[in-house]
Image: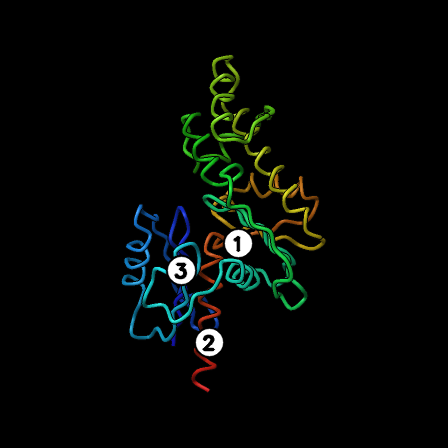
Amino acid sequence: MLSLGIDSGSTTTKGALFDGTNIVRTQVIPTTSNPKESMRRLYEEMHTDQVGYVVATGYGRELLPQADKRVTEITCHARGAAFLCPKTGAVVDIGGQDSKVILLDRDRNVVDFLMNDKCAAGTGRFIEVMMRILEEDLKNIDQFVAGKHPVNITSMCTVFAESEIVSLLAQGVDRGDIALGIIQSICKRTSFFAKRLNLHDTVFFSGGLAQFPIFCRTLEEFLQLPVVTHPMAQLAGAIGASVIGYQKAKQILK
């Protein structure tokens, strides 16, 4: 038996298949202007006769009628992070349009959390917009900022930050220096937000930006705590949903 977890995010829709021991398949597709259609497409591409339970999470979790259960993204991200890194004590997730900080107990259950979904500042969408202004692909960010010296970015409002960056470019400031300054601003803002909880253990970094080492290193510097991640960190929500789904299916079969 397999369980299918689907995470409907603002930027991407993620899916994970779990066999009770391993994640056997994952998939990521862009979330279109019709998130219901994105969830339906991913469900049809990943669902097989072996799937015995489906859990939906994320912003669009109510939009998949085939889901057997709908679970909040906080619970699913925590469960996914604990699956990928059993020693984690907290989760910092930077998504496309929000950020989350989740505190776990010794049994890896959620004991507290904070969520910022009111402003795009410090999110994946923010860095994407800034990198477009710098005319550089986000995928190349680690190489782009290597050996650079960060410029202080004073504004985290997307509109004001854009004006600030355009002004810096007009002054001839190095694009890599600006990009590194943006990264530091995002990680500094995220660390201030995260420190509102009593973080004291290894922090698991999830979300799309976790795939870039420069973000992991910079976040660790500002948090002053060990920060770890995983190649499948972007899929933490979907993985957590699939793990929860498998456990629910086992309870039904008893």
In contact (CB < 8 Å): disc 2 and disc 3: no
Vertical side of 7 occupied by 123: above or below: above
Q: Say what secondary structure mark 3 lies in.
A: helix
Estimate the x, y position of residue 220 in percent, counting from the top left: 64, 43
Pick whichever, 202 or 162, lies toward us.
162
Identify the mark nearer the N-term, 2 or 3.
Answer: 3
Pick whichever, 147 or 121, lies toward us.
121
Q: Say what secondary structure mark 2 lies in.
A: helix
Q: Which residue is mark 3?
A: 61
Apparent side of residue 87 relative to residue 249 in the rendered image (left or right): right
Q: Quick check: can you spot residue 82? A: yes
Three-letter code for the amino acid on which mark 1 is drawn: His
Vertical side of 178 occupied by 237: above or below: below
Identify the mark nearer the N-term, 1 or 2.
Answer: 1
Apparent side of residue 23 relative to residue 203 in the rendered image (left or right): left
Estimate the x, y position of residue 27 in percent, counting from the top left: 36, 56
Front of the two marks 2 and 3? 3
Q: Identify the residue at horizontal 48%, vertical 21% (top origin).
A: 163
Identify the mark nearer the N-term, 1 or 3.
Answer: 3
Q: Quadrant of the rendered structure where residue 151 is? A: top right
Three-letter code for the amino acid on which mark 3 is drawn: Arg
Q: Quick check: can you spot residue 146? A: no
Three-letter code for the amino acid on which mark 2 is drawn: Lys
Assess disc 3: are there few (<14), some (14-19) or many (≥20) residues with their C-alpha within 10 Å of its C-alpha.
many
Q: Identify the residue at horizontal 47%, vertical 19% (top origin).
A: 166
Q: Which residue is mark 1?
A: 230
Q: Which residue is mark 2?
A: 248
Assess disc 2: are there few (<14), some (14-19) or many (≥20) residues with their C-alpha within 10 Å of its C-alpha.
some
Assess disc 1: are there few (<14), some (14-19) or many (≥20) residues with their C-alpha within 10 Å of its C-alpha.
some
Pick whichever, 180 or 103, lies toward us.
103
Task: Name the quadrant of the N terminus.
Answer: bottom left
